[in-house]
Amino acid sequence: MADEIPETSVSGDWDELYYGTFYWHGIPTLLGCPLADDPAEADIALVGLPWAHNPTERGQYLAPRMIRHRSGALAGRWHREFGVNPFELARVRDCGDVTVRNLGNPDEGVWEVARFYERLDAAGCLPLTIGGDHACTYPVLRAIAGPNSRRKAPLGLIHFDSHSDAYGPYLGITHNAGNWARLGVEEGLLDPARVVQVGLNGPLFPESHHFAAEAGFRLLPLLEIEEAGIPAAVAEIRRVAGDGPAYLTFDVDVLTLGEAPGVANPAAGGLTTNEVFRFLRGLRGLDIVGADVVCYIPQHDPAQITAINICAIMHHLVTLLAETVARMKC
Amino acid sequence: MADEIPETSVSGDWDELYYGTFYWHGIPTLLGCPLADDPAEADIALVGLPWAHNPTERGQYLAPRMIRHRSGALAGRWHREFGVNPFELARVRDCGDVTVRNLGNPDEGVWEVARFYERLDAAGCLPLTIGGDHACTYPVLRAIAGPNSRRKAPLGLIHFDSHSDAYGPYLGITHNAGNWARLGVEEGLLDPARVVQVGLNGPLFPESHHFAAEAGFRLLPLLEIEEAGIPAAVAEIRRVAGDGPAYLTFDVDVLTLGEAPGVANPAAGGLTTNEVFRFLRGLRGLDIVGADVVCYIPQHDPAQITAINICAIMHHLVTLLAETVARMKC
Amino acid sequence: MADEIPETSVSGDWDELYYGTFYWHGIPTLLGCPLADDPAEADIALVGLPWAHNPTERGQYLAPRMIRHRSGALAGRWHREFGVNPFELARVRDCGDVTVRNLGNPDEGVWEVARFYERLDAAGCLPLTIGGDHACTYPVLRAIAGPNSRRKAPLGLIHFDSHSDAYGPYLGITHNAGNWARLGVEEGLLDPARVVQVGLNGPLFPESHHFAAEAGFRLLPLLEIEEAGIPAAVAEIRRVAGDGPAYLTFDVDVLTLGEAPGVANPAAGGLTTNEVFRFLRGLRGLDIVGADVVCYIPQHDPAQITAINICAIMHHLVTLLAETVARMKC
Amino acid sequence: MADEIPETSVSGDWDELYYGTFYWHGIPTLLGCPLADDPAEADIALVGLPWAHNPTERGQYLAPRMIRHRSGALAGRWHREFGVNPFELARVRDCGDVTVRNLGNPDEGVWEVARFYERLDAAGCLPLTIGGDHACTYPVLRAIAGPNSRRKAPLGLIHFDSHSDAYGPYLGITHNAGNWARLGVEEGLLDPARVVQVGLNGPLFPESHHFAAEAGFRLLPLLEIEEAGIPAAVAEIRRVAGDGPAYLTFDVDVLTLGEAPGVANPAAGGLTTNEVFRFLRGLRGLDIVGADVVCYIPQHDPAQITAINICAIMHHLVTLLAETVARMKC
Amino acid sequence: MADEIPETSVSGDWDELYYGTFYWHGIPTLLGCPLADDPAEADIALVGLPWAHNPTERGQYLAPRMIRHRSGALAGRWHREFGVNPFELARVRDCGDVTVRNLGNPDEGVWEVARFYERLDAAGCLPLTIGGDHACTYPVLRAIAGPNSRRKAPLGLIHFDSHSDAYGPYLGITHNAGNWARLGVEEGLLDPARVVQVGLNGPLFPESHHFAAEAGFRLLPLLEIEEAGIPAAVAEIRRVAGDGPAYLTFDVDVLTLGEAPGVANPAAGGLTTNEVFRFLRGLRGLDIVGADVVCYIPQHDPAQITAINICAIMHHLVTLLAETVARMKC
Amino acid sequence: MADEIPETSVSGDWDELYYGTFYWHGIPTLLGCPLADDPAEADIALVGLPWAHNPTERGQYLAPRMIRHRSGALAGRWHREFGVNPFELARVRDCGDVTVRNLGNPDEGVWEVARFYERLDAAGCLPLTIGGDHACTYPVLRAIAGPNSRRKAPLGLIHFDSHSDAYGPYLGITHNAGNWARLGVEEGLLDPARVVQVGLNGPLFPESHHFAAEAGFRLLPLLEIEEAGIPAAVAEIRRVAGDGPAYLTFDVDVLTLGEAPGVANPAAGGLTTNEVFRFLRGLRGLDIVGADVVCYIPQHDPAQITAINICAIMHHLVTLLAETVARMKC
């Protein structure tokens, strides 16, 4: 196996590499990548989106800050299980945090967020976001599949979550954390026949469930995954998502609480990190064109294990995106 | 699957439902249920029992308070995996906390606790208790199977725990947290041939082990469960418990520490929450007539994941009890 | 001094008293007082107001829940330093939490809160509230001094805080946590000549400062208190507040962080609890007709010392209010 | 001032000294002193007493363990403010923890504790104890002033506490944490005319207060200390305690919560550590023949500041005791 | 099964046993064993090694202190799954902590540590160490296989870890936490053909990976264990380690973060405690002649579950070593 | 007083100001100031120095990261008590963190740090550093007063600390956290007659004390400050420091633990934040040409109050430095 790792796979010597990613020195950038003001410098744009307006539990706006802090510790650039170095396959840049001025009114603030991502889309970047609550996903979808996007066509969706997030308005707010998937369908940003929701096990709200079922989402509850096994579940995700471009959104609450205490809407039971990594490895070769990780709350993460697990999930996601970039370049 | 959830399964509209269970508004009741002073209003009586006198580790008297706090967040009333709404099958009420005045002397205080449960038994309620330490189980058994009960006959017992709790007196105290199972047998409250202890893996004390083995308890250590698999273990529990009425007691320390750090007598290793849910789903149809969850310590639960897991376990238990009620009503 | 405490000052025997206030048994009520649905049963209405919409730091909606939890531990009913038992001077009742349905839009939700307090005002209660953020004060003032109130006349204000809270709208929201004092003046709920702000030491925002200064508020910054001494500062408060009815609002951030880590907008330095108690003792005899404690965040209060200090401050405030009630009854 | 510190005041060189007290190396002994099985080796016996049976809040049995852990960090042997090295004035030894087998029944367990201290008294040691709850003080008084003691005569008492601890039996237990002072008087272990209670400010229980007042204790509430000033309060303590032998007991709850969050019965307000050190310096020359520090709960001390303050208080107390030893030797 | 546990398997009666191991009474010794100054009293020497000089994350020097504190709670001496009482098979003693004076320069301090273990080796003890960072393993290997050892021959190595620890010097320090395995090979302390590294899944550093692969280590990454299953992995470990004497080193970071948050170099994913116990049970009969557990950081272990799991792992390791001792005695 | 605050004192409107300093959005810079690669852009250079090599307690290298995180929340630019806006008086820039490669050997790493500051000194900046342990002060002094500096002359020193830091080498390391003051004198970087050490109250080490006393430092122990009062102590500091250029170093452990739990070498008792602010206000007009804050440990600061207090202290220090800049510009 040693032969498979080229001596040159890591640019620079080890000390330099390691220093560059010491997690406590210097400005904390996402995955320890260089800052880039101009998205044209990036193939993959890492973005912090400290946006949250869900009154169930708060604090998700601090997530990008904590992930900036921890993800500098991603000392190893090479991805052991994928056998590639994503940072060599693509230009990965930290494009900073979105500054949201209309926090008080998410139905207005959402457009400011969307504009940020439209600028990235126009430059040809694939976005990888650390939220924020799950309302963060809508403006990204809008920017990469909506009327101002290059693509202007619906995407498939691979959605890891305990909840199906198709509830409709809530407390008078349309752009809440549980309505983005429904909005994505209603506005033609998502192709419902190519939506698969993985790991559902939280409390079931009938409205959301009925919308998802009637729209044609493929629901893969935790119960079905347990019974069918992960290989079968992976195959089903690949079948539903198909060959077209797809977005991947990862709500941290799909993890079991022992592995991810710091989540906004905790649900007992869930996937382990080992299982999540098996799922993500199973998605290689799909045309994943954007991704996010949402609903992390640092205040409920006393030993920061949720943060560390998120950094590893982002390492997997950046590798999936980098392989998409590499295919695009061919 | 959407068809299987009747539109009317949730009483009231979603906003109302959700508001009724916001976990931070108003008086915190168990599982967000209405308070009832009169047990005649209840089919299932939720009870907090802040009683603990085990000198190994303390603080279990705070458990009902924390579970009151968190369990209001049980927003989803419908039980996804069981496919029923237990709160429609039975009248579930919060009957408050037992006030124990003889905390200083558990061998006296136990009778005060028993009287509380005798009042529930006389009214025909099935009790679901959040303890307190494991000494809490004895007075409940006494009240529902002992000389003042309606039943006056021994029960089967499904006992999830790392320990076998048949030690005898300890430090001069008979009603300690490790002696209730032995007392239950000695006083004819339990039928030892219908006792099954699930998940044993803590340190083995010979006295307790010998009593359990000689009394005829079916011991299902964690090691045997790992080797036989959960389906076989479930079948064995069903065989031992049989068709007669049975009590279910759940000591949180049977969970692995990653899922349940907040326990009184921590033992390394154990069941995951996913595994516990598989066990509990496997018990449907048994005649379970009472249940409790014990040995939770909020002070050692920094992100409250133990509390959240307990709320989900109680959701399972209230569903098992509600199905018993539904069968009784037929 | 023993002679001054009548044997009969505490109703019931000690055991009963103490048990009644064990802080971990039973439904947690504010200061361990009986619940009352009907405000006519109360002279002083204790209210939890879990209302917060300030995007600086969140979590203040959990404050009433924590204060319910801790304040049952207020074992001693007699107030040692005042030499009275406020619970004998007045009927003190827990009137529950305000349920706020328009959390998503505070400019609408505020009226729902105000209606709750108008019902108390109509019944003749004096309100003592645990917030919530400082936006909580406006609807109370509106209810007890505004067009629907019995009084329909401006009040004096004794305002402990690090900030002057007269900023104007913020992020498009009028009823934010920093604008209630300005609104109170603009709507004639407060008499600016009888407003005194005590302990100011946080960052100074010119807009707020200019409004306060021009409106005629008496500003007592921490610096001036340090130089003049507490007796002089107390005298100045009494001079400004005068003989008319006055409201007292206490933002926990006026305390030094060592005594109150769990605050929403922390400012370094501040008053000690000993000093606050001296201030509050100095206000005896003023016509205080309502009070609140706001801006407590339980998540940043790891050893709960802020909560314990708040319970003691509320003991002082309920005593001041009970003496007002006693004077009214004469 | 440098002249006043003899070069030889510290035995051994600095490196050795410092290493000997590195707080994380080796067996943790109290104040980093050598263990001694035989009390004849000691002039001052440091003792851990992990004994608690107060149902208000638990966990005080862990206090000696934590103070063992932290007090090895008492790197400086020389007492800066006293200008002496107590470890040169007297042989200070760690005599270990008392093993209490009757934890379940304090009215029996107390005699086992007393026997431990009688052995120390017989050997001529002065005891300095880290408790445990305040019930720990009684068996020490019994051992050094009771029928089996060398002295067989009542002592004076300097008692720092928020509470007066003269309540009588509680929950059927005589030897509870709030009755030791009353028992000490009733059994002739204390001379009530030489008892002074310093810093009282917690909730006032009439029974306890009346007993204390009628027995003739000098009560020095926090309020009186604030008004009179510390020098006057020190003078009053010296006047009451007089020239005879006196015991000093320090309940950590007399400190303000900002300085001591980890206490069993927290009371808002209190003395600062600076003030406590002024008090203790003021007691030099009194004939203090034993001391204890009680009611510390490590679980509520997240940054361990209470522990660190206790170590400093014990440094003061061991210096007071060492000066007593030095006078005895003359 | 009850028959298999002889009545005499536990020396003394239960109360005595239990008291002897109450985890909060008395001097905290490793696994509650007696202290021994003279290694001749021990067959197995438990050692605390508070040594750390890895600048990635610090605080590992506090690990022995915490494990001393918790491991007294190992109430059950009998090992349930092994069916033996290791404390009867061998004389297990706490030989104290190594005092390291050259903390500032690990390349010098290492020899001081090695001398400590050489004394144990000369006395014929098998060492079981709680570190310290992973640099702790080198001086133990040096002492039991190096030029001053009785054995003077290379050992096999069973190495549980997320990392392969063959990096070379780092920041100019040879004896760093990631170089001990390389040094062991280079100095002939380890037989590379008998080295197996289990559970590798952290970031892959090419230098370390290349050295390990070229030296002939058998790498068992987590991925291979997942695919092959634990029984096959156990068989492979046995095949590689063979019949000769082997050392076992356990880096806590091989556990999944949910089970072990308190680690120095956290890696997402990993083995569960149940899986680790299966591995360790699978190693019975191998000639294991020493072991250690390293890289635990108490400060990141808020509910102490890592500590509790370590105590259980040490219970397994002491049993493996005791069986080696028993075989040697035959 | 309102008149004294010019309308134009804050550049830009309030919303913009506030947004610019939201503490959770974007790259976290020190005091929310712009980053500057080129020191020529700055009058005052804010620097993070994550450098620590003191084996007493670790983790100080994380301090700059936490202060970056919190200090963005310094919403108010205007300094209320000084009555100026330091960010208008001088160009204040965040010059980033010093990257230290020789962490393993502080006696080598120190020169790398010094070179960083020499670059600032050459550009004419006044440095304000957040450490790091107290060894951080030496390389700054070296850079601004040593052979490569513009000044090349000794400075006065105002040193807030519990310890006198003149110990000599320790564990073979010259540049340790307790030797910088001695080195500063020995190398002519400090004028011992203009050194004043304020607040000493930690354990007294004779070597350090003797050096300080003999070198002619003015020692102002806490005890003397308590007796003389703060105004007299301020006057004494001014007298010693005199008119010449002086450096100010602030070791957080001079604060009382209630206000600053997160310190490396905690000492019981100390100054309050209110008192520290009085001291710092008292130093206006002195020629302070550089400053630092050291010895903060975020891991022991659970509610982050130490961090918040440090931000306020840095606000005071940046104002003192800005007034020096303003005087220089005149």
Image (cartoon, coloured by chain):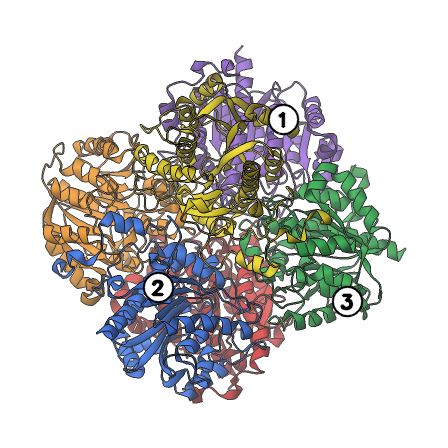
Chain colours: A green, B yellow, C blue, D orange, E purple, F red
Q: Is residue D281 left or right of residue B27?
A: left
Q: Nearer the viewer, mark 2 or mark 1?
A: 1
Q: Secondary structure at mark 2?
A: loop
Q: Quadrant of the C terminus of chain C?
A: bottom left
Could you tell me how far apart the alpha carbons at marks 1 and 3 are, in whole angstroms?
A: 53 Å
Report the residue marked by disc 3.
A143
Distance from the alpha carbon under mark 2 to that under mark 1: 67 Å
Residue type marked 2: Leu
- List x then y, in percent, for residue B322: 55, 41
The residue wearing badge 1 is B235
Using the image, determine if residue C162 lies above or below residue D138: below
Q: Secondary structure at mark 1?
A: helix
Q: Position of residue B161 (x, y in %)?
A: 51, 31
SS for callout 3 = helix
Q: Which residue is mark 2?
A: F271
Q: Residues within 10 Å of mark 2 (few under 14, many from 20)?
A: many
The answer to whether residue E189 is visible is: no
Q: Indicate the amino acid at tag 3.
A: Ala
Front position in the image: B176 or B323: B323
Please state the chain letter of the residue tagged with numbered disc 3 in the rendered image.
A
Say if E153 sits above or below E259 in the image.
Answer: above
Dot 3, crowdedness within 10 Å: few (<14), some or many (≥20)?
A: many
Where residue E165 appears, as percent x and y from the top left, is 65, 38
Q: Which of the two marks, 3 or 2, is nearer to us in this view?
A: 3
